[in-house]
Image: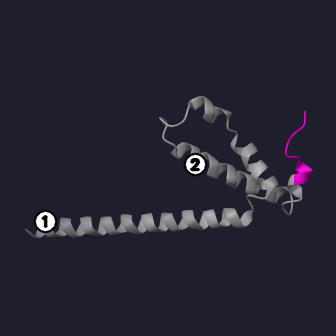
Amino acid sequence: MLIKPSIDSLLEKVENKYALVVLSAARARQIREALLAIDPDEVNDEDIKLLKEVSIALEEIDSGKVDFEFIENYARKIYQEQKESERLDSADEDSEESVDKEDTKE
């Protein structure tokens, strides 16, 4: 059985096999998250089952579409979204506390 893309081809794109594992896992996770975000009414379940996230990630790495910079930018975006979400949650909690304090004063 031939595996495509070949490990030799993939290792030409990254420093070593450990970097390949990290990069492919991160990209496969991105692909999976995107698939989960799709409206189920728009996609057939059978189509989703045919998609193999790791295979797609490896093909993208081999073709040069994905590298560590791509994953790094994605990680920064997620981190910023989490920080913003935490900030908004904190602001909501603060406003709820101030409303509770006003209610106890009355």
Q: Amino acid at mark 2?
A: Glu
Identify the residue shown where x is 33% and y is 69%.
91
The picture quadrant where one finds residue 98 is: bottom left
Identify the residue shown where x is 67% and y is 66%.
72
**Which SS class for mark 1?**
helix
Above or below for 69 versus 10: below
Foreground disc of the pair 1, 2: 2
Above or below for 86 versus 23: below
Q: What segment is highlighted magenta in the picture?
A: 1-9
- Kindly report the secondary structure that dominates the magenta region of the rendered protein: loop
Q: How is the image coloured?
A: one colour
If you read the primary sequence from the N terminus, does the residue marked by circle 1 or circle 2 appear first? Answer: 2
The picture places residue 78, in percent across and down from the top left corner, at 55, 62
Identify the residue shown where x is 54% and y is 43%.
36
The picture places residue 39, in percent across and down from the top left corner, at 48, 41
Q: Amino acid at mark 1?
A: Asp
**Badge 1, how many Cα within 10 Å: few under 14, some, many 20+?**
few
Looking at this view, name the residue that lies furthest to the left. Answer: 106
Q: Quarter of the image for the N terminus: give it.
A: top right
The numbered disc on residue 33 is: 2
Can you identify the residue that label 1 sits on? Answer: 103
Q: Please name whichever residue, 104 or 16, is drawn nearer the observer in this view of the structure.
A: 16
Above or below for 72 versus 11: below
Q: Please name whichever residue, 49 or 42, is drawn nearer the observer in this view of the structure.
A: 42
**Which SS class for mark 2?**
helix
Tell whether 61 sits left or right of 87: right
Q: Quarter of the image for the C terminus: give it.
A: bottom left
